[in-house]
Amino acid sequence: MTNEVMLNNGQLRAVITPAQGAGTLSFDVLRGDHWLPIMPDARRADCDLAASDFLMLPYSNRIEDGRFTFAGRTHQLAHGDHHAIHGDTRQRAWRVAESTATKLVCTFESSDYEDVNWPWPFAARVVYALDELTFASQITLWNRGETPMPAGFGWHPYFSR
């Protein structure tokens, strides 16, 4: 599994960690001859973040007590400290499907894991791309099951101050 992939277009650079949720480890912009951090570098010893951002799939935020009802059926998720929080993919390995100097495509299949904390099978893809002065991401989520699946996703950034 690839631990770090650097994207660099000469003006922007981002380091992504497919091995840990396909989150961003750092994001910088070139100003003059210096790289300035837009997001904190999670690899620095004085940074207590696992990543500068992370993806929240197949749900975001908190599910109170890890319990919810969908289509008339109650589902119980594993949870800590009262809530299931921020999805189940942020600390799991994603596969690198494509990698160039300015684009990274990572994929995730819940069926690769026996302990996914979600009652439905799902898949996800994230595309990161640098284009001039833009760092874009596109997230896609698929229901791999036979029945309808509730879902949501989010992006949890940390910005340098």
Image (spheres, rainbow, N blue to C red):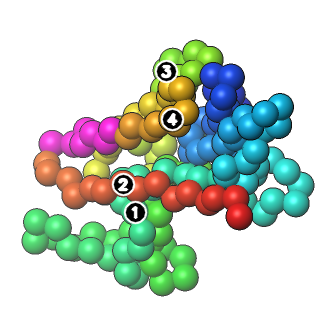
Of the numbered discs 3 and 2, the one sitting upstream in the chain is 3
Of the numbered discs 3 and 1, the one sitting upstream in the chain is 1
Q: Quadrant of residue 6?
A: top right
Q: Which residue is mark 1?
A: 60
Q: Which residue is mark 2?
A: 153
Tell me the residue at 40%/82% (across/down).
Answer: 65
* Residue type of the residue flagged with mark 4: Thr
| Mark 4 in CB contact with mark 2 (< 8 angstroms) | no
Q: So how many labels did they put on this image? A: 4
Residue extent of the magenta highlight: 140-146
Instruction: Please determine whether, in this image, residue 108 is positioned above or below residue 10.
Output: below
Q: Can residue 137 be seen in this snapshot?
A: yes
Instruction: Please determine whether, in this image, residue 71 is positioned above or below residue 105.
Output: below
Q: Quadrant of residue 32?
A: top right
Of the numbered discs 4 and 1, the one sitting upstream in the chain is 1
* Residue type of the residue flagged with mark 1: Ser
Label 4 – label 1 distance at C-alpha: 25 Å
Tell me the residue at 48%/43% (across/down).
Answer: 113
Q: Nearer the viewer, mark 4 or mark 3?
A: 4
Q: Can residue 3 be seen in this snapshot?
A: no
Tell me the residue at 10%/66% (across/down).
Answer: 71
Q: Which residue is mark 4?
A: 134
Label 3 – label 2 distance at C-alpha: 20 Å
| Mark 3 in CB contact with mark 1 (< 8 angstroms) | no
Q: Which residue is mark 3?
A: 97
Secondary element at tag 2 = loop
| Mark 1 in CB contact with mark 2 (< 8 angstroms) | yes
* Residue type of the residue flagged with mark 2: Phe
Residue 68, given in percent of the width and then of the height, sits at: 27, 74
Secondary element at tag 3 = strand
Q: Is residue 145 magenta?
A: yes
